[in-house]
Image: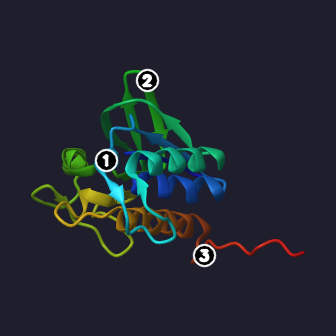
């Protein structure tokens, strides 16, 4: 079991946290629910009828927590590389983690740059799995698409990053899908 810090609690961060926690990894989400989602109205999120961003956030936070994700109402004040992982610092203390996912919107690009990730202005450069150029550092959401963000794309990016971490930990490709109960 690995420990993953997720900085940001919008669709990308919560989607990643849900998949990681559901698959028995420790997902710690740092965020103060100040996401841009609170200014959104979702008419085009597949599978959901019209929903306010605030209502979406409420449901997404509850769902991730129900699967075991730890939601910390803390602002990250520093991140440093330590060995193969990272140390996340908040006013409450420090936490050592194996992986780090930055999903806090454009404001997190400074953290990515400080950790050696390649950036193009405020956009963090990632591959198709949302890996940055720094090992074990992922970025998703508005941080990777600052001028083309959309909630369902951000959620998919977070899920993609989570599946890559799960596959890396398992040493093989991983799929996450469930079958309905049999009657």
Q: How far across and how far down the image is residue 115, in percent?
A: 25, 48
Q: Nearer the viewer, mark 1 or mark 3?
A: 1
Disc on the earlier residue, 2 or 3: 2
Which one is nearer the viewer's eye here, 25 or 106?
106
Which one is nearer the viewer's eye here, 13 or 151?
151
- 10 Å neighbourhood of mark 2: few (<14), some, or many (≥20)? few
Residue at image mark 1: 104
Q: Is residue 95 left or right of residue 153?
A: right
Q: How far across and how far down the image is residue 39, in percent?
A: 28, 47
- 10 Å neighbourhood of mark 3: few (<14), some, or many (≥20)? few
Q: Disc 1 versus disc 3: distance between alpha carbons?
A: 26 Å
Residue at image coords 58%, 72%: 171
Q: Nearer the viewer, mark 2 or mark 3?
A: 3
Residue at image coords 46%, 47%: 55
Which one is nearer the viewer's eye here, 177 or 166?
177
Residue at image mark 3: 175
Label 2 element class: strand
Residue at image mark 2: 93
Q: Disc 2 versus disc 3: distance between alpha carbons?
A: 35 Å
């Amino acid at each position: 079991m690995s420990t993953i810090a997720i900085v940001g609690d919008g669709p990308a961060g919560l989607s990643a946290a849900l998949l990681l926690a559901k698959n028995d990894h420790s997902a710690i989400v740092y965020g103060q629910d100040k996401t841009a989602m609170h200014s959104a109205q979702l008419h085009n999120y597949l599978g959901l009828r019209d929903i306010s961003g605030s209502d979406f956030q409420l449901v997404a936070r509850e769902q991730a927590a129900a699967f075991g994700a730890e939601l910390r109402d803390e602002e990250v004040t520093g991140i440093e590389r330590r060995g193969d992982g990272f140390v996340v610092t908040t006013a409450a203390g420090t936490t050592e983690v194996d992986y780090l996912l930055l999903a806090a919107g454009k404001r997190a690009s400074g953290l990515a740059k400080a950790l050696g990730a390649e950036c193009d202005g405020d956009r963090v450069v990632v591959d198709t799995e949302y890996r940055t150029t720094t090992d074990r550092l992922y970025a998703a959401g508005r941080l990777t698409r600052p001028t083309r963000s959309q909630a369902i794309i951000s959620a998919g990016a977070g899920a993609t990053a989570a599946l890559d971490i799960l596959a890396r930990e398992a040493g093989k490709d991983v799929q996450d899908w469930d079958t309905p109960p049999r009657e």
